Image (tube, rainbow, N blue to C red):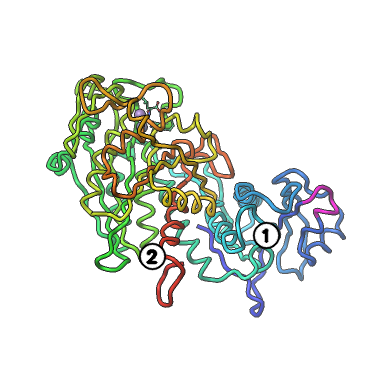
């Protein structure tokens, strides 16, 4: 991960290879005005063409006496107020360019402002994006792994970074370290990310942080009578797992927040098998679980004053002679039954048990994260995840948190009229609800497993958990979408910072 520090006015910083800045404006003149005065003079004197297109850049030698050897001016487009997504993309392009050019250290100026974010949110967003700007997953590349000399960045405390504090950099670093882990979990192919691999990795990370970890193996899952998880697992040669993380940063008696995640390490669809095209994407069908685990680990790193329980339900969904089949009736941990109409609607079947299990901790709130439905992509495309909850206040809080971290949520309803869609002739419900309102039908199914008095929200992240190809300034693959908004929401819930606490 990059080393990021703040340029202090007093100490003379060591000379850097590169100085990065972003210029925006309709023409050359305007673009120059957006630069800090000292750099503007340099660029004006040298006279190359202004960078116009997003991400286009030019370099200038800065001579022997300057703080950096070369200036890199990146074009940021027409406006000096840009979207968070664009900022994320620009920082990524900059990191890539410097790496390709062999620069190992850089000074960074960010003279633009971000849409929808105040100064503090902007700093947090930019710092996190910077720590993630060079994210890659080279584990399986042998010969042609790209060189990444860029190691250290010094941010200039002006422009968007005016007033930046060392603590903000530290917090962004802690966040990004976990976001990288969450992405790695997702990007690792399913042959190396079996339920037990996921569980082992999370156990290691939890232990390193003093977070309590319990792993249920198949025997323990049987004992818990998690009939849904066991049904989905029947086609797989690999055992299922349930991982439980418990972080106690809050007061002793305080009810925890429960974070539950869908962890299908590979979803072939099972007997209702998926078409071959894009099936490989289903290695990312565990991103809900990765997000839930990551949020607990990051909360521990940031020492948030909250009690958390994280629950990941893990299995593969595969066809075989022992698979669960359409028409089967499954009995869940809470005693309810469901007719399996389609074995590819497996996420709700495993989450049913996990949500019911979460109630054992008597949580104040339950959030679940799941790449649950392709219909989420039909509804909102790649730009937002769906939030379902009957709690208006919770909906508002989550949507607001997502606005502040650029992880947008859009609410859809769970009106009782939709319950009719999952009515079964043979069991308490069936696991699909026809063609219309596919994401809502999934949410209606999950609702059967949560006490209506307990605040609960379901996040269908199928459209935002991973991108292939790359999109919105994220690299190809897992995005860690949901991690930032969850931590933001947890901090907002704690209220304004009191002396001696680590709320914000
Ligand atoms: N994991 C998929 C949903 C998914 C699709 C996530 C595309 C990301 C991208 C889920 O298990 C699934 O297959 N859902 C079915 C449900 C249907 C059978 C009711 C779907 O969306 O088609
Ligand atoms: Mn499926
Ligand atoms: Zn799935």
Residue 355 spot, x, y in % from top left: 27, 43
> Residue at point 67% right, 50% down?
82
Looking at the image, residue 268 lies above or below residue 107: above
Residue 357 spot, x, y in % from top left: 22, 46
Number of numbered tags placed on the structure image: 2
Q: Quadrant of residue 285?
A: top left
> Residue at point 58% right, 42% down?
472
Q: Are marks 2 and 1 in contact (CB under 8 Å)?
A: no
Q: Nearer the viewer, mark 2 or mark 1?
A: 2
At numbered mark 1, what does the secondary structure look like: helix, strand or loop? Answer: loop
Is 403 on the left or on the right of 436, as rendered? right
> Which residue is at the front of the view, 28 or 380?
380
Mark-to-mark CA distance, 2 and 1 = 29 Å
Looking at the image, residue 30 lies above or below residue 386: below
Looking at the image, residue 382 lies above or below residue 158: above
Residue annotated with mark 2: 304
Q: Quadrant of residue 160?
A: bottom right
């Amino acid at each position: 991960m990059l080393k990021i520090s703040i340029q202090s006015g007093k100490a003379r910083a060591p000379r850097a290879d590169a100085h990065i800045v972003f210029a925006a404006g309709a023409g050359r003149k305007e673009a120059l005005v957006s630069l800090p005065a000292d750099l503007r003079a340099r660029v004006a004197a040298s006279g190359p063409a202004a960078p116009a297109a997003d991400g286009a850049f030019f370099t200038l030698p800065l001579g022997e006496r300057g703080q950096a050897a070369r200036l890199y001016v990146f074009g940021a487009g027409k406006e000096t107020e840009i979207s968070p997504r664009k900022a994320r993309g620009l920082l990524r392009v900059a990191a890539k360019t410097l790496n390709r050019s062999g620069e190992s250290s850089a000074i960074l100026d960010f003279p633009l402002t971000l849409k929808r974010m105040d100064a503090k949110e902007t700093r947090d967003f930019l710092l996190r994006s910077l720590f993630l700007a060079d994210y890659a997953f080279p584990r399986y590349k042998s010969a042609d792994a790209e060189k990444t000399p860029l190691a250290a960045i010094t941010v200039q405390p002006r422009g968007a970074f005016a007033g930046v504090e060392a603590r903000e950099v530290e917090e962004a670093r802690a966040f990004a370290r976990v976001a990288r882990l969450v992405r790695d979990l997702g990007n690792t192919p399913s042959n190396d990310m079996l339920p037990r691999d996921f569980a082992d990795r999370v156990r290691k990370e939890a232990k390193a942080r003093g977070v309590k970890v319990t792993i249920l193996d198949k025997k323990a899952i049987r004992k818990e009578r998690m009939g849904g998880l066991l049904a989905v697992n029947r086609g797989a040669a690999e055992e299922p797992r349930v991982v439980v993380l418990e972080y106690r940063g809050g007061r002793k008696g305080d009810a925890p927040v429960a974070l539950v995640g869908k962890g299908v390490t590979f979803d072939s669809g099972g007997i209702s098998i998926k078409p071959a095209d894009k099936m490989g994407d289903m290695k990312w069908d565990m991103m809900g679980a990765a997000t839930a685990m990551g949020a607990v680990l990051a909360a521990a790193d940031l020492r948030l004053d909250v009690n958390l329980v994280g629950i990941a339900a893990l299995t593969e969904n595969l066809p075989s002679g022992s698979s669960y089949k359409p028409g089967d009736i499954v009995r869940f941990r809470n005693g309810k039954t469901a007719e399996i109409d389609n074995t590819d609607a497996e996420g709700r079947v495993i989450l049913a048990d996990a949500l019911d299990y979460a109630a054992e901790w008597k949580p104040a709130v339950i959030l679940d994260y799941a790449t649950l439905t392709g219909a989420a992509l039909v509804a909102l495309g790649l730009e937002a995840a769906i939030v379902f909850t009957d709690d208006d206040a919770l909906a508002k809080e989550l949507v607001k948190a997502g606005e502040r971290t650029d992880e947008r949520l859009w609410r859809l309803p769970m009106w009782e009229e939709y319950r009719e869609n999952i009515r079964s002739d043979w069991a308490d419900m069936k696991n699909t609800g026809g063609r219309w309102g596919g994401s809502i039908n999934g949410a209606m199914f999950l609702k059967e497993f949560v006490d209506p008095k307990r605040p609960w929200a379901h996040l269908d992240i199928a459209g935002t958990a991973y991108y292939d190809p790359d999109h919105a300034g994220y690299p190809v693959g897992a995005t860690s979408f949901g991690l930032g908004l969850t931590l933001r929401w947890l901090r907002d819930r704690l209220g304004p910072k009191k002396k001696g606490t680590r709320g914000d």
